[in-house]
Amino acid sequence: MHRRGVGAGAIAKKKLAEAKYKERGTVLAEDQIVQMSKQLETFKSNLEEFASKHKQEIRKSSQFRVQFQDMCATIGVDPLASGKGFWSEMLGVGDFYYELGVQIIEVCLALKHRNGGLITLDELHHRVLKGRGKFAQDVSQDDLVRAIKKLKVMGNGFGMIPVGGSYLVQSVPAELNMDHTVVLQLAEKKGYVSVSEIRESLKWERERACHVLDHLLKEGLAWLDSQASGEPQYWLPALFSELTSRDVTPEEANQITP
């Protein structure tokens, strides 16, 4: 016996059913979007109410401020996105991070002659707190990171380079690629690095290592100790505490680099 083919009526019925399923799916999706939008608006409203109630804690406590920023991030709200509007007027967070950004710039400029424009986040935090005084609003490293991210709008001068479990803050428009970053990370433990150490650790050719180190010297980010035992050492002033713990003049810096 021959199997009967599917009739035109059955095909039309199947297509109609598929169209209805598709239409129903679209309606459900639209309903879900509407519900999510309502929930999001409710969340934003509750967040504004929370901010109004706890604005003093948000202003004064760095830990509370971090938690509040995380709450905002979950619904895509950036209290720092604009200097106007509810968040700025109610909390003053825009003014807080603007003032903090100015302090960061002042610290970096004051130390540029010594570190070439690189400073550890820890030292920057210490110096910012010292400059603010004991009675000023508390500032956390998270606050510094957020302020530095906002400073990036000024161009490629400010940025952060991951080193160990923290960051180096870059405050000069030096072009640093991945090779430079890897060498900075290698020098993080001792504060200095040598050509042979780079070749041994990174398996680089000598020319590549020298090219990176020469660039760091040119940009003022490294100092050369040509009298070190064995071979010359390239010191990163942002990374060794013995030098960063005291004030060094440009004349002293010149004596280190022959």
Image (cartoon, rainbow, N blue to C red):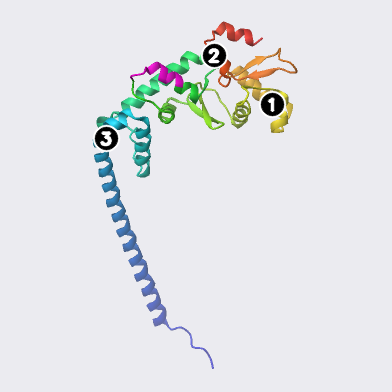
Q: Nearer the viewer, residue 150 or 226?
A: 226
Q: Position of residue 226 (x, y in %)?
A: 70, 13
Q: Residue 114 — which label?
A: 2
Residue type, mark 2 in image:
Arg
In the rendered image, residue 184, in percent from the top left (x then y), is placed at 60, 26
Please say whether residue 127 is one of the residues in the magenta stretch. yes
Query: Residue at point 25% right, 30% down?
Result: 89
Quadrant in which the N terminus appears: bottom right
On residue 209, the disc is 1
For discs 1 and 3, the disc positioned in front in the rendered view: 3
Q: Amino acid at mark 1?
A: Ala
> Which secondary structure lies at badge 2?
helix
Q: Earlier in the sequence, mark 2 or mark 3?
A: 3
Q: Reading the chain from its start, which is encountered first: label 1 or label 2?
A: 2
| Residue 57 visible, this angle | yes
**Cα distance between the residues tagged 2 and 3:** 42 Å
Q: CA distance from mark 1 to mark 2?
A: 24 Å
Asked whether the viewer can see residue 204, the reply is no
Between the C-alphas of marks 1 and 3, the distance is 53 Å
Label 1: element kind: helix
In this view, 240 is above or below 4: above
Q: Residue at x 31, y 53 (%)?
A: 36
Q: Is residue 93 above or below residue 48?
A: above
Q: Are marks 1 and 3 in contact (CB under 8 Å)?
A: no
Residue at image coords 71%, 15%: 228
* Highlighted magenta segment, given as a residue range: 126-135
Disc 1 crowd rating (10 Å Cα; few below 14, some 14-19, many 20+) is many
Residue, disc 3: 54
Query: What secondary structure is the stretch in magenta mostly built from?
Result: helix
In this rendering, position of residue 235 left or right of residue 81: right
* Rendered-image quadrant of the C terminus: top right
